[in-house]
Image: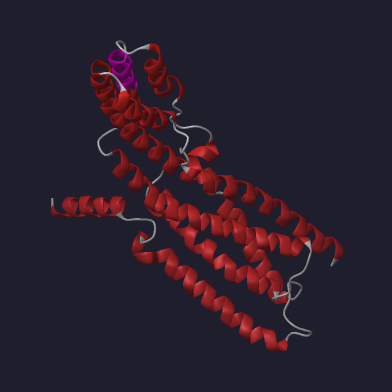
């Protein structure tokens, strides 16, 4: 029984352990040792190479081969994410290796170039690699922090419930506005008929809703209430309260969409850049063997 309890505790610990700390920073340690070994080998080899280190030396070919294989393996994470397993080759282990070995690629690829750069496909492949790594780092940050932000923003309310709240408030606003004359009712319709909850990708990403129809209608209702007859002012006061509640729910729903857009945005850079890197890497390798 004690053994079973220990195994259960280990499984729980493994479940809650982040990919950063997977197995006691195993991949961080392996990547660090690998980088130290490669830098040491480079420093030992460099003084004996004439005219100097480059991708065309024996060390350059070794580092290039390691780097190319590593890039292809790192790109396979998208396929691996669709297969759920546990143990040594779990998705968490793969992501941990992906992050730390991806960072080590900066050292490997830079030493492979021998610090020779120019306006050619070789430097293009190197630049794309840095772009992929940088965007990947942003993605790691996004997936480590934004889900918590999503949870904190919505509280106990789901996105579907938020939309239901907005619909319910619209119905209440519509019902409350029935006694109003045509000119005041037109202000209310501005909120009911022209409020854009989300919008296009860039609108959601930048969270720009300065032209929100509900806020404009709310401002107009507040102004109209000051000069309206007593019976209309009472109705407008109720509508003002409902529109303020609607503005709060809209802000929370739009914040959800903004955070989701942030999660999507890095993919629009990372995935295309990865394919571009694979294409440039292929051209780089083929050109090396054809012309060198």
The correct choice, above or below, for 274 with respect to 109 in the image is above
Residue sitting at x 46%, y 28%: 196
Q: Let me know if residue 48 appears in the view.
A: yes
Residue 176 figure quarter: top left
168 falls in the magenta region: yes
* Residue lying furthest bottom: 47
Most common SS among magenta residues: helix
Q: How many labels sit on residues? A: 0
The correct choice, above or below, for 233 with respect to 201 in the image is above
Say which of 116 and 160 sits in front.
Answer: 160
- Give the percent coordinates (x, y) of residue 191: 40, 24
The correct choice, above or below, for 2 with respect to 203 in the image is below
Q: Left or right of 263: which side holds 119?
A: right
- Give the percent coordinates (x, y) of residue 168: 30, 20
Say which of 239 and 108 sits in front.
Answer: 239
Residue 247 figure quarter: top left
Q: Quadrant of the C terminus?
A: bottom right
* Residue lying furthest right: 291
Q: Left or right of 263: which side holds 145?
A: left
Q: Let me know if residue 90 appears in the view.
A: no
Residue sitting at x 57%, y 82%: 40
Residue 18 figure quarter: bottom left
Magenta residues, as a range?
167-177
205 falls in the magenta region: no
Q: Left or right of 78: which side holds 177?
A: left
- Give the percent coordinates (x, y) of residue 4: 18, 50
The correct choice, above or below, for 133 with respect to 59 in the image is above
- Judging from the image, the colouring scheme is secondary structure
Residue sitting at x 43%, y 55%: 141
Residue sitting at x 39%, y 60%: 20
């Amino acid at each position: 029984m004690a053994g079973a309890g220990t195994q259960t505790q280990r499984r729980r610990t493994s479940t809650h352990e982040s990919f950063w700390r997977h197995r006691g920073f195993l991949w961080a340690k392996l990547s660090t040792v690998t980088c130290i070994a490669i830098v040491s080998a480079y420093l030992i080899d460099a003084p004996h190479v004439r005219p100097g280190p480059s991708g065309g030396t024996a060390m350059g070919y070794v580092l290039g081969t390691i780097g190319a294989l590593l890039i292809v393996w790192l790109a396979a994470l998208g396929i691996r994410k669709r297969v759920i397993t546990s143990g040594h080759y779990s998705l968490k282990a793969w992501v941990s290796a992906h992050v730390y070995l991806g960072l080590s690629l900066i050292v490997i690829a830079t030493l492979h170039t021998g610090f020779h750069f120019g306006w050619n496909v070789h430097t293009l492949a190197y630049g794309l690699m840095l772009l992929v790594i940088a965007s990947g780092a942003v993605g790691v940050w996004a997936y480590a922090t934004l889900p918590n932000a999503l949870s904190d923003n919505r509280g106990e309310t789901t996105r579907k419930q938020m939309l239901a709240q907005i619909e319910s408030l619209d119905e209440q606003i519509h019902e409350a506005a029935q006694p109003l004359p045509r000119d005041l009712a037109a202000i209310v319709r501005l909120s009911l008929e022209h409020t854009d909850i989300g919008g296009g990708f860039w609108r959601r990403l930048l969270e720009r809703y300065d032209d929100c129809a509900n806020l404009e209608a709310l401002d107009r209702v507040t102004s109209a209430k000051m000069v309206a007859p007593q019976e209309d002012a009472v109705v407008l006061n109720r509508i003002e309260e409902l529109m303020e509640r609607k503005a709060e729910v809209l802000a929370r729903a739009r914040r959800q969409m903004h955070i989701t857009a942030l999660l999507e945005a890095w993919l629009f850079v990372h995935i295309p850049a990865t394919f571009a890197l694979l294409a440039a890497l292929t051209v780089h390798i083929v050109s090396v063997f054809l012309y060198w």
